[in-house]
Amino acid sequence: MGDMVELTLDDIRNLSLSILAKSGFGPEHAAAIADTLTTCQVDDCQSHGLFRLFMCNDTMKAGKIDGHVTPVVAPSDNAIVRVDARGGMSLLAFREALPVLIEKTRTHGIAAMAINRCFHFSALWPEVEQLSSEGLAAMAMVPSHSWVAPAGGTRGSLGTNPLAFSWPRLGKDPFTFDFATSAFARGEIELYRRAGKPLPEGVAIDKYGNPTTDPQTAMEGAMLTFGSYKGSALSIMIELLAGPLIDDLTSLESMEFAEGQGGAPYHGEVILAFDPAQFSGGRAAANNERAERLFDDIVDQGARLPSQRRFEARARNTTRGYVEIAKSLRDDLLVLAEQP
Ligand code: NDP
Ligand code: PYC
């Protein structure tokens, strides 16, 4: 690992706010973005923490995003919360619609949020964990840009399409996973390129369809899904549920919309929430114990639950009051903060 520097939690938030303001985001969007970046960085989520300020800045420079727009939550009397981000970043739309999603989930037992017309750069676990902290189970998914070849294909059709899930656990960190359906997230490949490191085998192909471990060649060619045809099918499902189902763009269409300008993809997002109190037929406590028995059986044999590394980072960084990031990243962010 290269040289590391320490940043306090206030440093992370203030640096984010000042870069976002310089980039052209209004205070409400900047606050929603800075909160998510701080949450991610506290958990040592490097690919979608402070590093993503470059993507936010690039998105503004590409000229299509509105950094000041107010999202609109549509009134509804069913279990679907539709929120129109109106060409802004997704995070403020999610923040505005979250209380409605929670209320509808408690009313109907199951509810969904569909965010439309948003630019999207962020990790999904902070969103599903805001629902599990309310005692609800939740899933979230988004398309991105068509960088990823389907299994057996040779060119990008699918996005990196993350899928996140969180299950509430009484008095414990939730069971959460959140991963791209590509073998590597795009952000991870960018970090390998920055570090000058080769990728593992099986992550990408060049533009002629040959395997490559060079991050730049991979970014010019196509990324691969995880788990061959299984990851590929999951990725297609995400395209459908967070695209045509909710009247929004696929990753192919998002790529076309960008016209090669760079920045965050533009599309929709779906978040599903489930209330165990209603699904369990009055036996939520007993069923919770059965879930805990399953977790114990997994951990007892030496396997780890997803997100444990992140929760350990959170506990460590919160206790000591600072995080460590690469010095080269901090230096590049300070240059961004000084932009005219
Ligand atoms: P990773 O491969 O880094 O990790 C995925 C998950 O698997 C985490 O919950 C992780 O837990 C868990 N995990 C890792 N190793 C193990 C293990 N040995 N045993 C059990 N669990 C394990 O994720 P990705 O790089 O694919 O994605 C990173 C982030 O990028 C995600 O948050 C995702 O939302 C985001 N992303 C966003 C996109 C967008 O368009 N907005 C597109 C693609 C990705 P832990 O963290 O504890 O290691
Ligand atoms: O890491 O694949 C990724 C990604 C795409 C959009 C935001 N993050």
Image: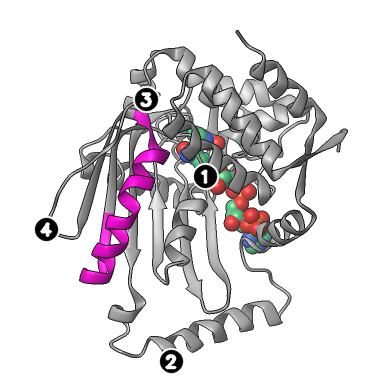
Q: Sequence order check: which comes first, mark 3 or mark 4?
A: 3
- Rendered location of residue 22, percent (x, y): 55, 18
Q: Which circle's residue, 3 or 2, is located before the other in the chain?
A: 3
**Placement of 141 over or under 274, stated as above or below:** above
Nearest to the eye among marks 3 and 4: give it. 3
Q: Secondary structure at mark 2?
A: helix
Residues 225 and 340: in front is 340
Helix, strand, or loop for circle 4? loop
Residue holding disc 4: 77
Q: Do the residues bearing badges 2 and 4 touch, measured as CB atoms within 8 Å?
A: no
Q: How is the image coloured?
A: one colour
Question: Which residues, given as a range, are shown in magenta?
Answer: 88-112
Residue labelled with disc 1: 123
Query: Is residue 47 in the magenta section?
Result: no
* Rendered location of residue 227, percent (x, y): 53, 51
Q: CA distance from mark 1 to mark 4?
A: 30 Å
